[in-house]
Image: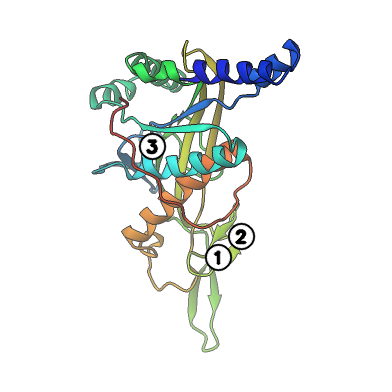
Amino acid sequence: MTHHRRLSSVAIAALLGLSPALAQRVQTETPGTVALMAAVGDQLSFVRQRQGTGSHIEPFTRQTLQLEGQQLNYAVLRGLDRAIELEEPAARRVLLSWNPPAELTKALNQVSSKDRNEQLLDALRKHLESVPDRKQWDRIEAVLPHYNYHGVKGLGTKLNGIGVYVQPLARNSIDIDTEGGVVEREERAGDYHTINPRTGEKSNYSTYVAPYFYFDRVTLDAKTLKVLSRKPQMDSVKYHDPDSVARDVSSQLTTAEVFGKLLDLAEKSAYKSVRGTVEVGAPKAITPPPTKAQ
């Protein structure tokens, strides 16, 4: 399809009496087709800090939640689609999603961080080899989970893809109230900015609920599946509601609120991976892609 469009551009240039060099320039500048692929998967990780229990036990508990549907991939596609539309307004965009098979996810959990990321990329390229439509595309922009062994910006270690990190252990101080009673207060002198989920006000509390999204945006040549670029990105937002009466920071937001903020982060992060900054606009609906690329 792209090939025919380019020939048409050259033919039109020739009919208009343009030089061969200018005709070639017209051909080169003809907008192409970009396939946008979200391969985030259908699992969420919940990681919670806990009191240290010894050198042989890590100070985190971990839980994996299996989701129904493609909410995570769709959020990523919304961000990618909006960014590419602004970056390349004349380009044709194709939306695709892919959930890594369960057996692949299980196997990846057994290898090191570097090998895990490389093997996931290899699996994606192998999947794309069987997609005949890619011969009609010019390039593929894919977002897939990134595993990071080290802690980043106040979050736990060994985080992968998309999930929620909870830091419930406060730095407390002891105050005396007006009646002489002892009051324990959480210090605000945290190391990172926290955001009030109700007002958007920033502070520095030492406890928070943090949706996170670690991913690679990989650019592939659609014909050869050669990697043209690969950009890791690790985003998170730390929420703390100082007006909440909940004793545990994890109870300051409902499950639905946390999930909504997670989807918002996924969309904005995917957008930012292309555009660099987030521009807030009216919500845009996209046609859901098939579960498997056709």
For label 3, the residue is 58
Whether tag 3 and tag 2 are in contact, CB under 8 A, the answer is: no
Indicate which label's residue lies in the foreground, 2 or 1: 1
Q: What type is the residue that disc 1 sits on?
A: Gly
For label 2, the residue is 189
Tell me if mark 3 has few (under 14), some (14-19) or many (20+) residues whose alpha carbon lies within 10 angstroms of its own: few
Whichever of callouts 2 and 1 sits on the residue coming sooner in the sequence is 2
- Please, what secondary structure does the residue beneath circle 3 have? loop
Q: Is 277 positioned to the left or the right of 195 in the image? A: right
Q: Position of residue 39 (x, y in %)?
A: 38, 31
Q: Position of residue 184 (x, y in %)?
A: 48, 71
Q: What type is the residue that disc 2 sits on?
A: Ala
Q: What type is the residue that disc 3 sits on?
A: Glu
In this orientation, does residue 293 appear?
yes
Indicate which label's residue lies in the foreground, 1 or 3: 1
* Quadrant that contains the N terminus: top left
Whether tag 1 and tag 3 are in contact, CB under 8 A, the answer is: no
For label 1, the residue is 200
